[in-house]
């Protein structure tokens, strides 16, 4: 599971790969956290979340949007993300993250996840995702 931050006009993009669909979702979330903050301290409680949507792309969007919401409402940076994705006509994600208090880090603002150029693709090696974030 890995991610790379990519320059994108006035925004930032995350390109991620992983063996599983849940792994690539978590890698994008870790990339999103890295776009906001370079160094995070140890510690912080794990928080769980569940998301459902009508498509893979909508699930990834809603998952990342929920993490941004948690950041804004609870004052935490979601790091060390874990996710499992399943589908039964509807797409579901069960995940968790380590909640680092924003007061303990120097974080840049990241406004929102976008559908612009979003791609979630199965490859011969697993999964690849590309997501652009509005900064």
Image: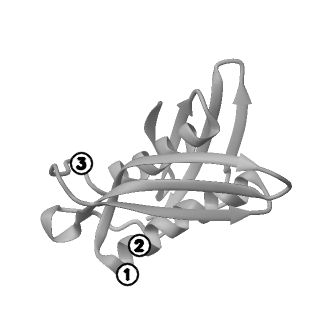
Q: In this rendered view, identify the residue nearer to me: 33 or 44.
A: 44
Q: Determine the image quadrant of residue 120.
A: top right
Name the front one of labels 3 and 2.
2
Position in image of residue 118 (x %, y %): 67, 50
Give me the C-alpha separation between circle 3 and circle 1: 21 Å
Give the SS element for disc 2: helix
Residue for badge 2:
70
Proximity of marks 2 and 1: CB atoms separated by less than 8 Å: yes
Q: Picture coordinates of residue 14 (x, y %)?
A: 50, 45
Q: At 29% from the left edge and 63% from the top edge, which residue is drawn?
A: 108
Q: Is residue 51 above or below residue 98?
A: below
Mark 2, Cα crowd under 10 Å, few <14 / some 14-19 / many 20+, is some
For residue 73, which numbered disc appears in the image? 1
Residue 89 visible from this viewpoint? yes
Secondary element under disc 1, as helix, strand or loop, is helix
What residue is shown at x 22% (from left), y 68% (from top)? 102
Q: Seen in the image, is 68 located left or right of residue 25?
A: left
Between 94 and 131, which is closer to the camera in this rendering? 94
User: Is residue 114 among what the camera can see?
Assistant: no
């Amino acid at each position: 599971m890995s991610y790379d931050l990519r320059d994108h006009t006035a925004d930032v993009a995350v390109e991620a790969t992983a063996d599983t669909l849940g792994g690539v979702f978590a890698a994008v979330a870790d990339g999103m956290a890295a776009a906001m903050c370079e160094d995070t301290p140890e510690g912080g409680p794990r928080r769980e979340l569940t998301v459902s949507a009508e498509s893979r792309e909508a699930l990834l969007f809603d998952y990342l949007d929920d993490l941004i919401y948690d950041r804004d409402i609870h004052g935490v940076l979601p790091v060390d993300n874990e996710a499992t994705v399943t589908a039964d006509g509807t797409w579901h994600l069960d995940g968790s993250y380590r909640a680092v208090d924003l007061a303990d880090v120097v974080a840049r603002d990241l406004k929102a996840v976008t559908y612009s150029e979003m791609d979630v693709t199965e490859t011969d090696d697993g999964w690849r995702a590309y997501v652009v974030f509005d900064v």
